[in-house]
Image (cartoon, rainbow, N blue to C red):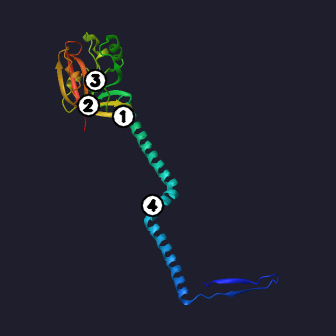
Amino acid sequence: MRPSATIYKSGKSGQSGQTLISLPLASRIFYTFIRGTGTGLTAFAIISFLFAFGPIIQQEVGYYFNKDANSEENGNYETLVDTSRAEETLEVQKEAESYNVNSYFSVVIPKIGASANITANVDATNKDEYLSALKQGVAHAKGTYFPEQGKRILLFSHSTDSPLNIARYNAVFYLLRKLEPKDLIIVFFADKKYVYEVETKTITDPSDTSWLIDRGDSETLVLLTCDPPGTTWNRLVVEAKPLK
């Protein structure tokens, strides 16, 4: 590129002309050097920018063009999780049904063939309330906890004051005395299955409530009934821990 100019003659003659103006050699060399240096610096700046921010730009651009696909994959994963949970819930419901109990809240003791639905939050000090609940199955003591809460869970099925009423009120835990350490107890709660392993079996005085006190030593399932069956002489207490 060479400098050029257009020369106009003054006046109204309308004549004009164009001539090339040639710079000295040294000026041309200097001009070329400056132009090359500017181009090089510009290129260097662009390359440096791409080198520094290229990975970030690549990630942003990649995310922009793939966000729909990512959302679809995430949705598919959530669908799989929901499907898995639904299948698991269905299996639990079917298993509970095979024991003739519901999966909302129930207990099954395979060794003694005992199974019953559980009435939650029954006042163990209110005779009318707990006797009404025990006609339906097993009672969960009000003020105690539920599976996965890490505290003591108390389930009871009282004997009656007469051996003639054993079949009416105490059929569920009638054979509870047969349980030994390592025997299993199944609790269905909120469409989930929990398995506990018997640790201790104790016969104690009716006035003894030490077994009800939470010791803070992890979750414990407590089964309580009167002993011998059909009497109110003693209490039979079975304690079990979640099976690991």
Q: On residue 192, which mark appears?
A: 1
Labels 4 and 3: the sequence-earlier one: 4
Q: CA distance from mark 2 to mark 1?
A: 16 Å
Mark 2 and mark 4 lie on one chain; the one further toward the N terminus is: 4
Measure the C-alpha gap from mark 1 to mark 3: 18 Å
Indicate the secondary structure of the residue bearing disc 1.
Answer: strand
Three-letter amino acid code at disc 1? Lys
Q: Which of the marked residues, 2 or 1, is nearer the chain's N terminus?
A: 1
Q: Which is nearer the N-term, disc 1 or disc 3?
A: 3
The residue under the point 51% across, 82% down is 33
In the rendered image, the residue lying farthest to the front is 11
As measured in the structure, the alpha-carbon distance from the residue carrying label 1 to the one carrying label 4 is 46 Å
Mark 2: amino acid? Glu
Q: Which residue is tagged 3?
A: 154
Q: Position of residue 14 (x, y in %)?
A: 81, 83
Q: Which residue is mark 4?
A: 56
